[in-house]
Amino acid sequence: MKARCKYCRKSLGGETSNGTSHLRSHIKTCIQKRIHDGSQKILGPNYKPSGNPQLSASQYNYEVSRKELCSMILVHEYPLSLVDHVGFKRFCCSLQPQFAVPSRNTVKKDILSLYGVERGKYHTIIDGNLGRVSITTDLWTARNQKRGYMAITGHFIDNSWKLRNIMMRFMYVPAPHTSERLADRLFDCLLDWNIDGKLSSITLDKCTTNDSMIFYMRTKLLSSDLLLDGKLVHMRCSAHILNLIVRDGLDAIKDAINLIRESVVYWNSTPKRVQTFFEVAKQLKLSFEKKLVLDCPTRWNSTYHMLSVAIPYKDVFFRLSLRDSHYTSVPSSEQWEFASTVIGKLEIFSEITELFSGSKYPTANLFFPKICDLRIKLNEWGLDPNPVIFGMASQMSLKFDKYWDDIHLVLAVSVVLDPRYKLHVIEYYAGKFGNTETGLVAENIKQMICGLIRDYQTKAENKSGSESGTSSSGYGTASATELDFELFVSQRKKSKTSLITTELDMYLAEDIIPRTAEFDLLLWWKLNGLKYPTLQSIARDFLAIPITSVPSESAFSSGGRLLDPHRSRLHYSTVEAMMCTRSWIMEDMQRGKMQLNLSTLLVYVLE
């Protein structure tokens, strides 16, 4: 008679005379049982943020598995009903029979709990950060819920001099969406995250509601806590300004655009017409690599994409007009020529829009040279003998001049704080614009930065003075000698203007750094903080200012996928928890991937 272990299938004595002590001893030492119970560590793949598996020892933990399940649902935007699918339950059981798949309501509770933990972690990061925080915000209406959501994203350079972008709120805003209500919700968010006293700027789209909202925000915020008493608190979205400028330019060929748009709609309406278009293109020996795309009239870059795809097929459209009598919206040869010329002119706008839509690198310092190049192009187009190009340049120049004053201050300071440009780029473009007194223009920018330095040092002195007063309050009344010494120190502080100028002059006197693709602007300021302490503080705040509201608008893409017709009944508090937690998890994964790449680079350098 033998006894066989159910885990390792080992045979042991099973006679009554053998007793049971040896069976209990085997159960305590059975490796297969420990693996089944999860107490034994197993050598296997462990997926890091980079996505590549690495070999490591791990053991089963039910709580960790539930957390990873929530992270998977959030990151990949799976529905909560995934845990109710029989196939998913069978799959989990095959991996670990002890893992009891939680219900949908349990997963929702776990997500809310994870939201609280991650929110507290990022609260701590922002509270301990030395620099200011810039805000981008935008409003979006969910079609399936008919509700308005306000996305608020924070941008700052952390103490390790890495640019961070985190979603602070994805809050439900009940109608009507007036400027007062939006200002109240935004101010509540600032108070909740304790950044009302360290706010740098608010980047918004250009509309009257946002302008009124900024007016109400100024009444709520203390001007002494803002940069230059609040002169820089309102930053207009540069991508939106470019959109307005180009849309005015496209009005010069609006008739041709309407005909091309109607043509694209006509030949994309049925599969038969698409096939006919492909066959005619093949007859004319044209490669049909790009399919016709329809634009969104309010987004100029989509119109640019539609035209750039349709123009190479102009001969196809003309041939199809001879075969199909119902197709009557074919553009003329002159309209095709005008559209081709305008698209060639607007290529620089498309490149700049794509460049400044990034959110993982500083963009304010890059925008100034590019926007000056645009101004030079507009001046050149204004001399074109073609009346269409001349009219387009005139309309775009008027819009450019209207919005330039709204953004040039932040851009000028940011580009001067780039050691690859400094004041040289100001003088260079001032000469290009026909200004003979280039030195005077550069001197005005320099004096503006001097004012910023004084403002920063005054705020730092007031902060240190309040802290020292609090710390010394427990030591009794100061003596007459100590009071006299404090008066002497305060008088010396008032005479530090020459020292301020010296710090800026030292920075400007050094040679500019060669412009290379490998140059890391944030790392340069991190390493040169001891030499230029006040300029470092200014660079930390200004280089974190986003020039577009793209980071907040990109959240609406995820929101649209989250609130699809099958998940339109989600409560708005659950929507906010899922959107914010997903953003924070993705941020952690991205930072983990960057750290892994950095460690790999260090190993390579050491080898």
Image (cartoon, helix red, strand yellow):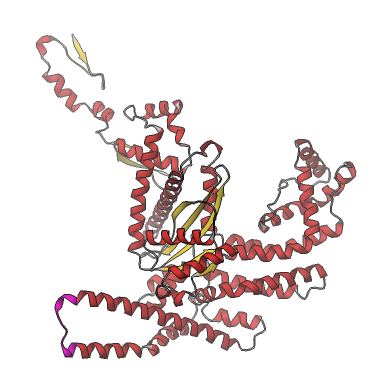
Q: Which quadrant of the rendered structure holds the N terminus?
A: top left
Residue 463, x across and y down, in percent: 31, 76
* Residue 427: quadrant of the picture: bottom right
Residue 266, x across and y down, in percent: 79, 44
Q: Is residue 236 left or right of residue 32?
A: right
Residue 446, x across and y down, in percent: 50, 84
Tell me if residue 488 is in the magenta stretch.
Answer: no
| Most foreground residue, 346 or 565 | 565
Relative vertical location of residue 106 with respect to residue 585 in this rendering, above or below: above
Which residue is found at the position 36% from the left and 52% from the top? 119
Relative vertical location of residue 83 with respect to residue 236 in this rendering, above or below: above
Which residue is found at the position 32% from the left and 80% from the top? 461
* Residue 8: quadrant of the picture: top left
Residue 52 makes an appearance in the image: yes
Question: Number of callouts in the render?
Answer: 0
Q: Is residue 507 left or right of residue 241?
A: left
Q: Which quadrant of the rendered structure holds the C terminus?
A: bottom left
Residue 316, x across and y down, in percent: 82, 47
| Most foreground residue, 600 or 273 | 273
* Residue 67: quadrant of the picture: top left
| Most foreground residue, 116 or 433 | 116
Range of the magenta residues? Answer: 472-482
| Most foreground residue, 553 or 341 | 553
Which residue is found at the position 44% from the left and 54% from the top? 169
Residue 46 makes an appearance in the image: no
